[in-house]
Amino acid sequence: MRLPDRETVLRYARRALYVCLGLAAVGCVTVLLVLRHFETGLPDVHDLREHYQPPQVTRVLARDGTVLASLFVERRTVIPFAEIPSHTKLAFLAAEDAKFYEHQGLNYFGMLRALLANLRAGHTRQGASTLTQQVVKNVLLDSERTYKRKIKETILAHRLEKELSKDEIFSLYLNQIYLGHGRFGIEEAARYYFGKKAKELDVAESALLAGLVASPEKYSPRHDEARALQRRRYVLDQMLEKSFVTQELHDLAQASKVRLAPASDGESELAPEVVSYVKKVLDDVAGDAALHGGFTVETTIDPGLQAAARRAVRENLDNYATRQKLTAPFTQTSRKLWGPVFSGIPKQNKIYVGKVVAQNDALGTLDVQVGDVLGRVSIASDDRYNPKHLPPSEFAKVGAVLRVGLLGSPDSPTPVPLRLELGPESALIALDVRTRDVRALIGSYEALSGGLDRALYAKRQPGSSFKPFLYGYALHSRRFTPASVLDLTKKNGKELVSYRESVRTAIAESDNAAADKLIDEVGAANVVEWARALGITTDLQPTPSLALGAYEVLPIELCNAYVTFANGGEFELPKLVTRIVAPGGAIIPLPATPPARRVLSPEEAYLITSLLRGVVERGTAQRAHSLGRPLAGKTGTTNLAKDTWFVGYSTEMATAVWVGYDDALPLGWGEAGAQTALPAWMSFMKVAHEHKPPTEFPKPGTIITANVDPLTGLLPYAGEENVIEEEFLDGTVPTEVAKPDAGADAGAVDAGPDDETKAAKNATDAGAPASIPAVVPDASAVEPPVF
């Protein structure tokens, strides 16, 4: 066989070279065109250094740092690279990209190996991504496994390496990476798995977390500790092989046991009312940035007192249910307390009385006929009304009446979802007397996130708990003293009975006739302005019914007004949020609030407190006297007991408790402020004052003490033995002396007001006192409640 000559070989070689060069040129052009094609519309890596703002966790903290809630879209907390321990960084490098600080963002050998493996498999199996590529994938692109995405990833990785330093890229990686159970980034993973911050991780813990990256759920120690340890061993071996740790450290970490923190997911049930309020504040002060999270919100809530308040409210409502026989099994076919069974077409989100028509133990549901609509209520998971988890057949018989709320539209396919509404609701608000800090905030029995917070937002009639405003203004006007005797009349059957009663006795016994008398004397318009100065922002009208608390108030405002009595007469808005820290550490200014201002003198505040102490010591709230410390307060009950209250305070804490149905249903026979609201107040205040010695309300030195005749309120006559000691503001001690026979002749005590007093009264009724000092502060300066 004749071999080709040298010239022929050279000719073919040149042709082959030209073809190769041509193919290379075409390949280069193709690559350039492909790169140019995929470069279009790629994210800009330039802003990552200054504008990396991934979703983060916003933490709501109690006053002692306890986490009340973690709010997030992605559960992540970004931390500085410098706070991450060196051994933690090395663990992730050993597990994911040991040569990260040597390459330029791409591992070409690994990419080729992965390409061949994927071609053999016929689909994408391996990624061979460097840390830089993982940052690109997690921060700038999606995680879809396609060749198109891989090309984009390669381009962006090259750009990222030029734009950022290695440490900056590594920091992005450690803050962005997903590590299982909804946790993103090293900080959240450290908190979740080990109950500590990332800067506190040891070598063994770091290796375990680094091992999660390959498959977070598969290698989770909460799912499979043996598999997690196997993966940790691999990471530790890689660290030893790469000389990232010494043999001694390796062996110690290898022998270390896994000590996991208790798992904690979701929002705490401790204070959802506080969390809802915080969300609104964040929206106001941070705007759209609040959606990205990363804030730390510090509140005034005391976790121990918050828990005690919730417990007090729930136990109190449970006891009410027992008294009124609102506990399973339900067998009655009618119930006077709830009224008649509803007929007609019900409305969504309204409450009705319906009849049970079917039971389903398998589903844990009852079908209830509500007028023309068939509804269904699930009782299986209702811890309030079905704490024993009875099956429906044992919870209520067919034909029994139940009170339910309509959750769905009556026009929707039946059965429409229902919710049990068997009992009333309650609110409790507790304020620190010295600081106005909110220590406990309870807006419902259920403690549902996003539920109605009755402590902050429910407007309800205060009943007699409004009377301290009336009595306070009466003392402030200097026309009445605690010793002033009121000539009163009230019906006793069909007869009209006349009697006398001192101001002190009247408020202690919550005498409505006395309140009617006082508001007629001092003028309802003045009492409205007085209440405004004390922080009541709801609609109050200057009518006689104001004296009996007929106009609605907010529990938070009523409680805060009582704090003004307790702290010596200075008014200030309550505080719930004390500080908001932005993701970068900057302090965000809170909404401005008016400065503290004096509404009444310390002497006037003391005298009101003195009167309210009588309510506890010998009046309608005597049960509270068993707490064994100086207390002041007032019960409140509206017509038909639709609202019941107790608002009271010590030298340290002021607390308001309200109990009632949301739809203003009467609470039933025997229910009143002292029976229905006071027990919850007492239960909470007992806990709030544990291990604290009783302290007396400070008495100003200018308060004058004098003996008076108990029948007239005047100075005792010579030789009178039946005298009482009473307290007075300076200048209000009586100068007239009682007559020995004054008690036998009411006319000798008070022949009626003179012309000057009548003129003052008429001017007062018109809202402009004549001789009565006009010392009510400008109510227009009173701001709505902002904490």
Image (spheres, rainbow, N blue to C red):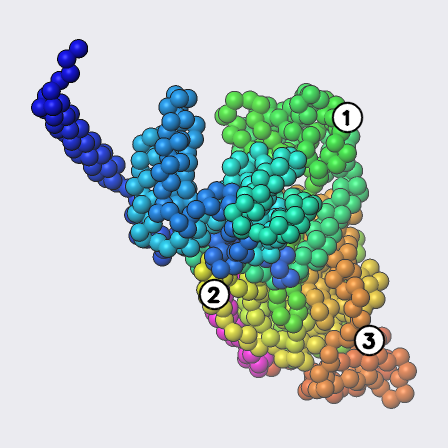
Residue 29 % position (x, y): 17, 34
Q: CA distance from mark 1 to mark 2?
A: 56 Å
The residue wearing badge 1 is 394
Residue 316 % position (x, y): 75, 49
* Residue 557, image quadrant: bottom right
Q: CA distance from mark 1 to mark 3?
A: 61 Å
Residue 252 % position (x, y): 67, 50
The residue wearing badge 2 is 587
* As drawn, 413 above or below 668: above
Of the two numbered discs 1 and 3 on the same chain, state the one appearing first in sequence: 1
The residue wearing badge 3 is 711
Residue 653 visible in the shown view = yes
Residue 454 visible in the shown view = no
- Badge 1 crowding class, 10 Å Cα cut-off, few under 14, some 14 to 19, many 20 or more, is some
Instruction: Assess whether mark 2 and mark 1 are in contact (beta carbons under 8 angstroms).
Output: no
Q: What residue do we see at 80% from left, 66% from top? A: 691
Instruction: Assess whether mark 3 and mark 2 are in contact (beta carbons under 8 angstroms).
Output: no
Closer to the eye: label 1 or 2: 2
| Residue extent of the magenta highlight | 766-787
Of the two numbered discs 2 and 3 on the same chain, state the one appearing first in sequence: 2
Query: The disc labelled 2 sits on which kind of residue?
Result: Ile
Q: What residue do we see at 65% from left, 45% from top? A: 254
